[in-house]
């Protein structure tokens, strides 16, 4: 019993942040859910203070799509949260039991979750740890979000440990950097949730659902890919914008029960009385429709249709995507051949916590024109841009593109100063992309340049 009030009846689940219990509130004689926070968090005064701040915000929410927070307390070193108990099962358990969901149902669930997130954001509350196990689906199909406050408190007080504590495989890339949190992290988490509902798998750096499930419409695939874009500035700016796009992209619309019911059948005499004219109209419409579909007819003219005129060839659809290089090697044509190269693949391994590090230039000067990372895309691509992440901003680099890696240092672009996340617009075609570094910056153990992740933005017609 906690606080002489809450009897822990049954363990419902565990996570790195604590244990969830079904419990009985003996004061009000009702079933509740209690989360007992993990001791390594509960023993941290900074985390507890952050959690208290977050729970005050969450307690003021009255959004239908969110589980209401009822109480917070501490007892003998334990910190716990009490929320209303929701009958039903988590979306993770649902997918595990039934497999991936249908496209229409996924769109409905995703839109409902996003509407609840948007209401949270309107009140200044971020989730920052949303996963399929944090969304409960009731027997009537309604969904509600749980575990509010924990993720935001972890992000505010234990940023370096956030990926470990909050399921790093489903967090937005910028969370691993400890950058200031904003709404786009929850947009990314919602995109990962929709991806999992459709495929039964977490994205783990992937953005295309159609790569795993071909019946997902292309428009929906593009919508989810935008939500999962590793560059937060390319994502939807808000949960509402994502919800609207997801609803538009879904081929199935969720309608009210009365709209789903078929209209009553007319009496047989109506068919007899109107049958012949209706049949003529139907046949005529079918002929015209076939003509339009085959391109022989088009809408227009005094009779409503006319022979089709020649039209220009359709413009091919162009899609833009961020790709990971197939390989990364170091180019050091002006050095001594000892530049660090074994860790070059870490610049494109999908893990922002690992990084390629140059040699240590103790005096802060390269002493040569530069050193490069050569990214191999395996084939010539139309390149629209480059995205580069670094834990130590401030060094300068230039970019070159081409099909001959040896000639890239002779065709470098304008200097760019690296930020934590740098976006470089480009317009060229080639198989290889070179990131040519011309300066280093102070780091913990000297002077280096470090690149934790690099992506190439390509377009395909």
Image (tube, grey):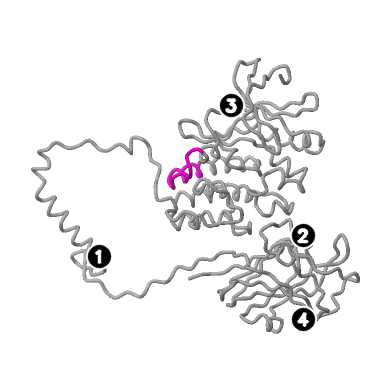
Q: Look at discs 3 and 4 and give the one toward the viewer.
A: 4
Residue at x 73% of width, y 54% of height: 177
Which of marks 2 and 4 precedes in the sequence? Answer: 4
| Secondary element type, mark 4 | loop
| Secondary element type, mark 2 | loop
Q: Is residue 314 magenta?
A: no
- In this view, 149 is above or below 234: above
Which of marks 4 and 1 precedes in the sequence? Answer: 1
Labelled disc at residue 292: 1
Q: Is residue 241 shown left or right of residue 177?
A: left
Q: Nearer the viewer, residue 293 or 434?
A: 434
Characterize the local packing of mark 3: few (<14), some (14-19) or many (20 or more) Cα atoms within 10 angstroms. Answer: some
Characterize the local packing of mark 2: few (<14), some (14-19) or many (20 or more) Cα atoms within 10 angstroms. Answer: many
Which of marks 1 and 2 precedes in the sequence? Answer: 1
- Mark 1–mark 3 Cα distance, whole angstroms, equals 57 Å
- In this view, 293 is above or below 262: below
Question: Which residue is labeled 4 in the image?
Answer: 333
- Mark 1–mark 4 Cα distance, whole angstroms, equals 63 Å
Characterize the local packing of mark 4: few (<14), some (14-19) or many (20 or more) Cα atoms within 10 angstroms. Answer: some
Q: Look at discs 1 and 4 and give the one toward the viewer.
A: 4
Q: Look at discs 1 and 3 and give the one toward the viewer.
A: 3
Question: Which residue is labeled 3 in the image?
Answer: 85
Labelled disc at residue 169: none
- Mark 2–mark 3 Cα distance, whole angstroms, equals 42 Å
- Mark 2–mark 1 Cα distance, whole angstroms, equals 58 Å
Residue at x 27% of width, y 74% of height: 309
Residue at x 50% of width, y 31% of height: 138
Splitting the image into 4 quarters, where does residue 42 fall?
A: top right
Q: Which residues are magenta?
A: 97-112
Q: x, y (%) of residue 227?
A: 56, 54
Question: Which residue is labeled 2 in the image?
Answer: 391
Q: Is residue 105 magenta?
A: yes
């Amino acid at each position: 019993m906690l606080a002489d009030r809450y009897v822990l009846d049954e363990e419902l689940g565990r996570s790195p942040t604590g244990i969830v219990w079904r419990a009985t509130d003996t004061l009000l004689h009702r079933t509740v859910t209690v989360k007992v926070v993990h001791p390594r968090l509960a023993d941290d005064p900074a985390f507890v203070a952050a959690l208290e701040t977050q729970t005050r915000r969450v307690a003021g929410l009255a959004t239908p799509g969110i589980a209401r927070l009822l109480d917070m307390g501490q007892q003998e070193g334990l910190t716990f949260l009490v929320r209303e108990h929701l009958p039903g099962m988590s979306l993770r358990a649902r997918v595990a039991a039934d497999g991936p969901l249908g496209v229409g149902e996924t769109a409905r669930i995703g839109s409902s979750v996003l509407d609840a997130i948007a209401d949270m954001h309107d009140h200044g509350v971020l989730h920052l740890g949303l996963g399929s196990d944090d969304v409960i689906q009731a027997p009537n199909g309604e969904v509600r979000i749980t575990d509010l406050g924990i993720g935001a408190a972890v992000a505010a007080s234990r940023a370096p440990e956030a990926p470990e504590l909050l399921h790093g495989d489903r967090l937005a890339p910028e969370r691993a950097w400890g950058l200031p949190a904003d709404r786009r992290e929850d947009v990314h988490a919602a995109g990962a949730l929709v991806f999992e509902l459709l495929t039964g798998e977490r994205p783990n750096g992937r953005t295309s659902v159609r790569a795993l499930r071909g019946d997902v419409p292309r428009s929906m695939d593009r919508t989810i890919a935008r939500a999962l874009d590793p560059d937060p500035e390319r994502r939807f700016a808000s949960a509402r914008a994502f919800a609207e796009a997801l609803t538009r992209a879904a081929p199935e619309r969720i309608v009210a029960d009365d709209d789903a019911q078929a209209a009553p059948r007319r009496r047989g005499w109506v068919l007899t009385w109107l049958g012949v004219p209706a049949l003529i109209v139907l046949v005529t419409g079918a002929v015209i429709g076939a003509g339009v579909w085959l391109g022989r007819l088009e809408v227009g003219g005094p009779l409503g249709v006319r022979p089709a005129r020649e039209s220009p060839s359709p413009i091919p659809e162009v899609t833009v995507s961020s790709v990971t290089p197939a390989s990364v090697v170091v180019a050091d044509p002006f050095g001594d051949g000892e530049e660090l190269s074994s860790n070059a693949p870490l610049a494109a391994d999908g893990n922002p916590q690992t990084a390629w590090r140059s040699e240590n230039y103790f005096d802060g000067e390269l002493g040569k024109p530069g050193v490069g990372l050569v990214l191999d895309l395996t084939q010539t691509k139309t390149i629209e841009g480059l995205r580069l992440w670094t834990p130590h901003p401030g060094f300068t680099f230039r970019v070159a593109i081409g099909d001959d890696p040896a000639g890239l240092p002779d065709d470098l672009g304008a200097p760019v100063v690296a930020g934590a996340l740098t976006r470089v617009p480009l317009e060229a075609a080639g198989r290889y992309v070179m990131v040519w570094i011309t300066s280093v910056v102070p780091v913990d153990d000297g002077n280096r340049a470090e690149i934790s992740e690099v992506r190439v933005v390509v377009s395909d017609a």
